[in-house]
C-alpha cells in the first residue's frame, strides 16, 4: 500500500444538478423461465411494502399467493417473567462462578418469557384464475422485470396467445392482474380465492370478498387463544368483451377479450398500539382503496406503478460485462454456476434483485419492516414464524438499505423500533430493574421483548442496543438532522439509559450479565458439554463501544446532553477490550474458552469488522486476527447457511481480499440460492439476499473509515476481484451523503463521479492515494483517475 497523500485536483468537472446521477437503467433486468413454478419457492415475487404477491405463472391454475404485512396470529400482552428481578442476582452469581448449568435452569424458570414463544406471520390467501379452455401449451415464458416491478407470463394455447401481467402498486395500494388474448372472446376462466383457515369467501356481481378473523387456540408455548386479528380482502374484476358473473363463491369469466383484477387486503392492526384495534374496519379499508383505484384505467394504473417503482429502483445501475447470457432462463444460468461456470451478469442480477426485494417488502404504503421472509410467506405457521430475529437477521435485512441508495426502506424499521421501546421499557424495569429500554433475540409485531424460546439462544439483552445501529447508519448516510433529533437519538439515548443501569462491575470492568454469544456455545475447562450463558461476550463489548461512541457523537451534533456524554465516556473506558486468544483468533467470550462448534453459522465476535468499524487496517493485530478467525470458522464448516455466507462476503470485502470475497459470492449462488434467486437458509430466509447484496456492493465501495477530523473516507474498489475486470456502477451511496458512480477497465478505475448531497468534506481514496476536497450541496465532482490518483 502506497503512502496516503493529499493531492490537488488535476481534473475536476463540477456539475450543478439536483437530479440523481442515474435515473434510467441502460438495460432492463429480468428473471425469466421457460416453465411454470410448481412450488412456492419457484414463484416470482412482487410487492409494494404493504402487500406481496407470488406469481406461479401456471396457465392451468393461474395461481397467485398473496400477503399483507400485518396478518399475524397472536396478540399483545405482557410476557415478562414475574420472577426475573428476584432471581437475577442469583443467576448472575452462578455465571460469575461458572456454574452455568444452574444459571441455565434457573434462567429458563425465572427469566424466560411467559409463555416462552409467540405466534407466526401468516399467508393471507391464494388467488386462482383457472381457465376453462384446455389445449396444447406452446411458446411459454414467465418473466419478472426488476426495473418495472412487473411479473409477466405469456403462452399460446391452440393458436391463441395469452398475456398475464401482475404487479403490486404502491401509488394505488392494490395488486393488479391483467390478462389479454390476441383473439377476441378467448378468455374463459373461474376466479376464486382461498385460505387454509379462519376465513369465508363470497361472490357478488363482479366482486369477491374474503373475510375472517384469526382464531388462536390456547397454548402453553404461545399464550392465550381467542378471536384475534380481523382481516378482509376484496377483489374486483372488470372485462372488455364477454361477461363476468358470480356463481357460488367464485366469479366466472366467459368469452372476454381482456380482464383486469384489483385485489387489496387489510387487517385491524394498529402500529401505534402494537395490537389490533377494533376501531379499524378492514372491510372499509378495502372498500376505500378499491373505490379509488377502480376509477383508473389499467393503463393509468400500470403507468403510475412503473413511474413510482422505476424512480427508486433505477437509482443504481451495475454492469460487469459477461457473455450476454440473458437469453438463457435464469434457473438454467444458476444451475450452470452451481456446476462450476461463472456468470458476472448473474452476479449483477442477484445484487439488483436484493434491492428489488427490499423495495418490495419495506416502503410506503407499508408500515412494517421486512421480516425473515421479507413480506412473502405462503404458510400459516412459517419457519421461525417469519418473525423479527434481532440477533443478526433483522439487522442484516437493512445492510443494503443505505449503500444501495434505498434510504426510505429504513423508515418502517425506524418506526417499529420506536414502538418497541415502550414494551422494552417494561421489560427493562421488570426483568432487570433498569431504566431505558431493551429487547432480546426475537419478537413480533405485538412487541414481545422478554427472552424468547430458551435461554440457550434467547438471552441477548443488548438486542435493543443493536437495533439502534440501522437508525444511526441512516443518519450517517443521509445527514438528516431532523431524523436524528426526532427519530434516532431518543431511541439511542433510552437504550443507553438501559446500558448505564444494566452493566455491573467485574474485575475492574463494566460487563453484561447474563448474556451469550448468539447462538454459539463453549466448553468449560474439564467439561465436555455445551454452555451458552456467560458474561461480557465479545459481541456485547463491541456493541457497547459502538453504541456509546454513536450516542456521544449524536449528542454533540445535536448540542445536547453534555453531562450525560461525560458519564458515557467514563463507562466507555471500562468496557472490556477485544482480545486475541491462544490460537491467534479473536476471542468470542470473556475467557479463552474452547468452542463447542468451531464452524458455527454465527460469527458474532467479528461484528467489529463488519458491520461496525472497530477492526480495520488501523488496528493491524486485530485485523490479522479477524482474518484467522474467519479462516478457522470456514475450516470447520462455517458459512453453511445463506445469511452466514452473505456475512462472510462482507468480512472479506472489509479485509480487502477480493478473490476470497468473490469465492464466497459464488458459494452463495451455488449452495444457498433457489431457482427464483431467493436465499436458501434452508429453508427460504430473505436475510441472505440482503446480506449478499450488501457484500457485493461493499466490495466496490466502503465508507466506514474516517480522517483525523472525523470526516468519512470513500474507498473506491477496495475488493475488486480479477473476474470483474471491466465494469461500472452508478448511484450507490457513501457515508456523508455522497452518491458515487464509477467505471473501471482491466481492473483499474478510470473515472469516478461523486455527487455531494449535503456539502460535506469529500475524501476519496483509491489505490493508496487520497484526494480531499470541500464540496457544495448538489454539485457533482468528476475525476479522471489517471490524472488525479497518482
Image (cartoon, rainbow, N blue to C red):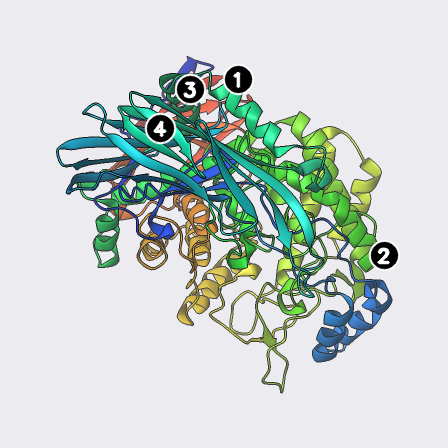
Image quarter of the C terminus: top left
Q: Nearer the viewer, mark 1 or mark 4?
A: 4
- Work out whether residue 722 or residue 190 is closer to the camera in this orientation and state it: 190
* Direction front: furthest residue: 248
Nearer the observer, disc 2 or disc 1? 2
Find residue 178 and report its horizontal and vertical position in percent: 34, 28
Look at mark 3 in the image and give the residue it sits on. 304
Q: Which is more toward the observer, 227 or 591?
A: 227
Residue nearest the viewer, comparing 185 with 258: 185
Task: Tell me, for residue 148, which label it has, or none.
Answer: 4
Task: Relative to 750, say whether 439 is above or below.
Answer: below
Picture coordinates of residue 98, whole percent (x, y): 72, 78
The residue lying at 75 percent from left, 57 percent from top is: 79
Disc 2 packing (10 Å; few <14; some 14–19; many ≥20):
some
Rounded to the nearest whole Å, what is the CA distance between mark 3 and mark 4? Answer: 11 Å
Q: Position of residue 169 (x, y in %)?
A: 45, 27
C-beta proximity under 8 Å, tags 2 and 1 = no
| Front residue of 251 and 505 | 251
Tell me the residue at 59%/32% (across/down). 283
> Which residue is under mark 1?
776
Residue at the spot of label 2: 433
Say which element carries label 3.
Answer: helix
Q: Are marks 2 and 4 in contact (CB under 8 Å)?
A: no
What residue is at 71 percent from the left and 40 percent from the top? 419
User: Looking at the image, is mark 2 or mark 3 nearer the viewer?
Assistant: 3
Q: Nearer the viewer, mark 2 or mark 4?
A: 4
Q: Element at badge 2?
A: loop
Secondary element type, mark 4: loop
Mark number for residue 238?
none
- With 367 as the anchor, is 306 left or right in this view? left
The residues tagged by marks 2 and 1 sit, at their Cα atoms, a distance apart of: 49 Å
Q: Earlier in the sequence, mark 2 or mark 1?
A: 2
Amino acid at each position: 500500500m502506497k503512502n496516503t497523500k493529499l493531492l490537488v485536483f488535476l481534473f475536476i468537472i463540477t456539475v450543478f444538478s439536483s437530479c440523481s446521477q442515474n435515473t434510467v437503467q441502460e438495460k432492463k433486468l429480468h428473471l425469466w423461465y421457460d416453465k411454470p413454478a410448481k412450488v412456492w419457492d419457484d414463484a416470482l415475487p412482487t410487492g409494494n411494502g404493504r402487500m406481496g404477491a407470488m406469481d406461479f405463472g401456471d396457465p392451468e391454475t393461474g395461481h397467485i399467493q398473496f400477503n399483507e404485512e400485518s396478518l399475524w396470529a397472536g396478540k399483545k400482552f405482557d410476557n415478562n417473567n414475574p420472577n426475573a428481578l428476584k432471581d437475577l442476582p442469583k443467576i448472575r452469581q452462578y455465571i460469575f462462578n461458572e456454574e452455568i448449568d444452574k444459571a441455565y435452569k434457573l434462567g429458563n424458570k425465572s427469566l424466560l418469557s411467559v409463555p416462552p414463544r409467540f405466534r407466526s406471520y401468516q399467508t393471507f390467501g391464494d388467488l386462482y384464475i383457472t381457465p376453462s379452455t384446455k389445449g396444447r401449451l406452446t411458446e411459454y415464458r414467465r418473466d419478472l422485470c426488476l426495473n418495472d416491478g412487473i411479473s409477466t407470463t405469456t403462452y399460446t394455447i391452440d393458436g391463441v396467445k395469452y398475456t398475464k401481467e401482475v404487479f403490486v402498486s404502491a401509488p394505488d395500494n392494490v395488486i393488479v392482474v391483467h390478462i389479454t388474448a390476441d383473439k377476441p372472446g378467448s378468455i374463459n376462466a373461474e376466479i376464486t380465492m382461498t385460505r387454509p383457515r379462519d376465513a369465508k369467501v363470497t361472490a357478488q356481481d363482479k366482486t369477491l370478498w374474503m373475510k375472517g378473523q384469526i382464531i388462536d387456540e390456547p397454548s402453553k408455548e404461545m399464550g392465550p387463544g381467542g378471536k384475534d386479528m380481523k382481516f378482509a380482502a376484496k377483489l374486483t374484476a372488470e372485462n372488455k368483451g364477454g361477461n363476468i358473473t358470480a356463481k357460488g363463491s367464485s366469479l366466472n369469466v366467459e368469452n372476454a377479450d381482456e380482464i383486469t383484477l384489483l385485489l387489496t387486503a387489510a387487517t385491524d392492526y394498529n402500529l401505534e398500539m402494537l395490537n389490533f384495534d377494533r376501531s379499524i374496519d378492514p372491510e372499509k379499508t378495502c372498500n376505500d382503496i378499491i373505490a379509488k383505484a377502480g376509477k383508473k384505467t389499467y393503463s393509468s394504473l400500470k403507468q403510475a406503478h412503473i413511474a413510482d417503482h422505476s424512480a427508486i429502483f433505477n437509482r443504481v445501475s451495475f454492469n460487469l460485462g459477461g457473455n450476454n447470457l440473458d437469453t438463457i432462463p435464469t434457473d438454467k444460468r444458476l444451475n450452470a454456476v452451481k456446476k462450476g461456470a461463472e456468470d458476472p451478469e448473474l452476479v449483477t442480477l442477484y445484487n439488483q434483485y436484493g434491492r428489488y426485494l427490499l423495495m418490495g417488502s419495506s416502503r410506503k404504503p407499508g408500515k412494517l419492516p421486512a421480516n425473515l421472509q421479507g413480506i412473502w410467506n405462503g404458510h400459516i405457521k412459517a419457519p421461525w414464524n417469519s418473525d423479527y430475529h434481532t440477533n443478526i437477521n433483522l439487522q442484516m435485512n437493512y445492510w443494503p438499505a443505505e449503500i444501495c441508495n434505498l434510504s426510505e426502506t429504513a423508515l418502517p424499521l425506524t418506526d417499529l423500533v420506536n414502538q418497541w421501546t415502550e414494551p422494552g421499557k417494561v421489560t427493562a424495569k421488570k426483568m432487570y430493574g433498569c431504566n431505558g429500554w431493551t429487547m432480546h433475540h426475537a419478537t413480533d409485531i405485538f412487541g414481545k421483548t422478554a427472552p424468547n424460546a430458551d435461554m440457550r439462544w434467547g438471552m441477548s439483552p443488548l438486542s435493543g442496543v443493536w437495533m439502534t445501529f440501522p437508525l444511526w447508519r441512516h443518519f450517517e448516510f443521509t445527514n438528516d438532522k431532523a431524523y436524528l433529533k426526532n427519530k434516532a437519538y431518543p431511541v439511542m439515548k433510552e437504550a443507553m439509559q438501559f446500558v448505564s443501569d444494566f452493566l455491573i462491575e467485574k474485575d475492574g470492568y463494566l460487563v453484561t450479565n447474563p448474556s451469550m454469544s448468539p447462538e454459539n456455545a463453549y466448553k468449560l475447562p474439564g467439561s465436555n458439554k455445551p454452555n451458552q450463558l456467560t458474561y461480557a461476550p465479545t459481541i456485547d463489548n463491541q456493541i457497547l463501544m459502538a453504541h456509546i461512541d454513536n450516542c456521544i457523537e449524536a449528542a454533540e451534533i445535536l448540542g445536547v446532553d453534555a453531562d450525560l456524554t461525560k458519564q458515557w465516556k467514563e463507562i466507555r473506558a471500562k468496557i472490556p477490550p477485544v482480545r486475541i486468544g491462544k490460537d491467534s483468533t479473536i476471542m468470542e467470550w470473556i475467557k479463552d474458552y474452547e468452542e463447542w462448534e468451531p464452524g458455527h453459522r454465527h460469527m458474532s465476535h467479528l461484528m467489529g469488522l463488519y458491520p461496525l468499524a472497530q477492526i480495520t487496517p488501523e488496528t493491524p493485530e486485530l485485523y490479522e486476527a479477524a482474518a484467522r478467525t474467519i479462516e478457522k470458522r470456514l475450516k470447520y464448516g462455517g458459512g453453511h447457511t445463506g445469511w452466514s455466507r452473505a456475512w462472510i462476503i462482507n468480512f472479506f470485502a472489509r479485509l480487502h481480499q477480493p478473490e476470497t470475497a468473490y469465492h464466497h459470492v459464488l458459494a452463495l449462488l451455488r449452495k444457498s440460492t433457489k431457482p427464483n434467486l431467493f436465499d436458501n437458509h434452508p429453508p427460504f430466509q430473505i436475510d441472505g439476499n440482503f446480506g449478499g447484496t450488501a457484500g457485493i456492493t461493499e466490495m466496490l465501495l466502503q465508507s466506514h473509515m474516517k480522517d483525523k477530523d472525523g470526516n468519512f473516507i470513500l474507498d473506491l474498489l477496495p475488493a475488486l476481484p480479477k473476474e470483474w475486470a471491466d465494469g461500472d456502477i452508478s448511484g450507490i451511496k457513501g457515508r456523508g451523503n455522497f452518491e458515487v458512480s464509477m467505471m473501471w477497465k482491466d481492473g483499474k478505475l478510470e473515472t469516478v463521479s461523486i455527487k455531494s448531497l449535503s456539502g460535506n468534506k469529500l475524501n476519496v481514496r483509491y489505490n493508496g492515494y487520497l484526494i480531499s476536497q470541500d464540496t457544495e450541496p448538489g454539485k457533482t465532482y468528476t475525476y479522471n483517475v489517471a490524472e488525479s490518483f497518482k
